[in-house]
Image (spheres, rainbow, N blue to C red):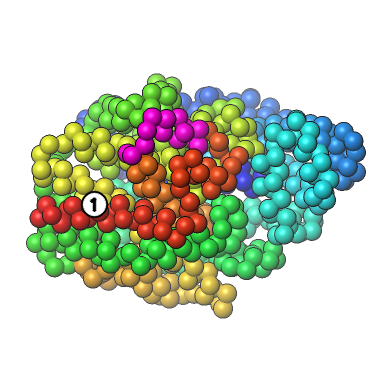
Amino acid sequence: MTAKSATSRASKTSRKTAISKGTAVSKATAAKSKTGKLPEWNLADLYSGIDAPEVARDLQKMDAECIAFETDYKGKLAENVAKDNGGQWLAAAVKRYEAIDDLAGRLGSYAGLIHAGDSVDPAITKFYGDVSERLTAASVHLLFFGLELNRVDDTVIERALQTPELAYYRPWIEDLRKDKPYQLEDRVEQLFHEKSQSGYAAWNRLFDQTISGLRFKVGGKELAIEPTLNFLQDRAPEKRKAAGQALAKTFKENERTFALVTNTLAKDKEISDRWRGFADVADSRHLNNRVEREVVDALVGSVRSAYPRLSHRYYALKAGWFKKKKLAHWDRNAPLPFAATGTIAWPEARNMVLTAYRGFSVEMADIAERFFTDRWIDAPVRPGKAPGAFSHPTTPSAHPYVLMNYQGKPRDVMTLAHELGHGVHQVLAAKNGALMAPTPLTLAETASVFGEMLTFKRLLGQTKNAKQRQALLAGKVEDMINTVVRQVAFYSFERAIHTERKNGELTAQRIGEIWLSVQGESLGPAIDIRPGYENFWMYIPHFIHSPFYVYAYAFGDCLVNSLYAVYENASDGFAERYLAMLAAGGTKHYSELLKPFGLDAKDPKFWDGGLSVISGMIDELETMG
């Protein structure tokens, strides 16, 4: 309902597709035998099914509540807030607004999650589309509230905020008023809102459905994108090459569609930004993240200048381990020759993560354990399921759900640690209510990356074999490069696309040229970019669903590196301060939340400190030979 809460409920997926029914059965059976039985989530905590009477009841209730709210409050805010009891009057209105937001969050989350579980079932697809339309139509009746609230004079709002009932919502109100300079006339806002269903939301669905339908021929089999991408991490070099070439072939055949989607959404964003008065292509994202442009610019500048001592140096090392001068782009994430083989069974992965969490905080582990015991995780690969991974916060009156595609690889264990970090964060922040639980993206990745780091450090400490320690350390460096270097390169790519789009449409060839330019800069001379890689931009969903989201990963990783250094040198009480930071949700600016740890992201040296952790690990790898 609010822009902020809607953003927080977006599924955090790394990519979206479906798995062909023909290949999924055998793969699922094989995976089960190696990984053990994998859990599937129980969405009945939201609704028992798409035909459940409670769904129809709540949709009707939402419609009625939205209309009643508009009838009771529209056109009355300025007058009533200015009265002596204006604070109490407004607090009652905000509480009603929050209750509607929570109900809408429950409906929207259920529709989104069941669709993520099976994105090709026609009945589920229709349900997802219908609920999305109902949510949009109902929320039109609420648009006036934020717009009118932002037109109330600052002094009047400040006087009203002295009322204790309203003072609780101060963070949300102050956050909302930051949007004031970019707010349009009410009817224009309504038009933008209603047209979103036939505008960018429709193009988002087209992207999802197109990706879901793509098939890639690998070894005589027609595969969907998830198992095809998985082959890029296969131990057999011929399988990695075959997968890389299959991806290139299918992407090439579909480049016009993806170029059209990209051009259309970039133009749609440019129109909105121009009407709202945003000066820079990424300013709307920075505002949504509550982070200053200069802070992001400093982060990006630091990472780009560090490419040579991070990714360039690491990939040169990796090529040497494979006894080559250069690695083909499809070998970038290849498992190391000396890495352990075998599949990590689900119970073992669960134990690894929970043990690492418990070593840091019993409370953190207890919350994470509920995801297993209460069936809040969906882990198997199956037909029609969205690939990648995410933790969806749903709404404070319910609980988060984690989706992943577990195949027993070490990276899958890290993904589990990552998503449970999000889940713990979302559980802790839920007490703030639907309006203030959502966390800006700048901090949303902190808990997830910290959870990964805890798990990695514990595994490293338990590994005595020198070669396995080397493999574990190298794997962590690769993950950090993918999180920091790769995401900043993605951000640079998006900036170039959106900037150039202002001058007219970009052909698929031109988009590919920009992609190759930023990838070549970030990957360095030890990665041999072969023909076909120019279209690998097509499957990144963040470019479509959440423009400029990607820098949040680099922000979170560098922040966690600095935070973890404080933890390793901290006296007692760090875990309590850390959990308090997560529990704050969206009630405080990131700078305020970092103060108890002595960290300041505005300090130019801050980012260099986080990057030096990665560089230090590469130093250690170089000494291992």
613 falls in the magenta region: no
Q: Position of residue 394 (x, y in %)?
A: 55, 35
Residue shown at the point (37%, 66%) measured from the top left: 304
Q: Position of residue 534 (x, y in %)?
A: 34, 69
| Residue 129, quarter of the rendered image | top right
Q: Is residue 123 visible?
A: no
Query: Which residue of the protein is positioned furthest toward the bottom in this rendering?
Result: 503
Nearer to us in this view, 559 or 472: 559
Q: Is residue 456 left or right of residue 112?
A: left
573 falls in the magenta region: yes
83 vs 243: above or below: above
User: Circle 1 sits in a helix, a strand or a loop, which is it?
Assistant: helix
Nearer to us in this view, 416 or 294: 294
Residue shown at the point (75%, 43%) measured from the top left: 142
Residue shown at the point (88%, 42%) measured from the top left: 82
Q: Is residue 601 visible?
A: yes
- Looking at the rendered image, the quarter that the N terminus falls into is top right
**Residue occupied by mark 1:** 617
- Looking at the rendered image, the quarter that the C terminus falls into is bottom left
| Residue 527, quarter of the rendered image | bottom left
Q: Dominant secondary structure of the magenta stretch? A: helix
Neighbour tally class for label 1: few under 14, some 14-19, many 20 plus, Cα within 10 Å: some
Q: Is residue 106 left or right of residue 61?
A: left
Q: Is residue 517 left or right of residue 348?
A: right
Q: How many marks?
A: 1
Q: Position of residue 357 (x, y in %)?
A: 35, 30
Q: Which residues are magenta?
A: 568-582
Nearer to us in this view, 330 or 587: 587
Residue shown at the point (58%, 62%) measured from the top left: 283
Amino acid type, callout 1: Met
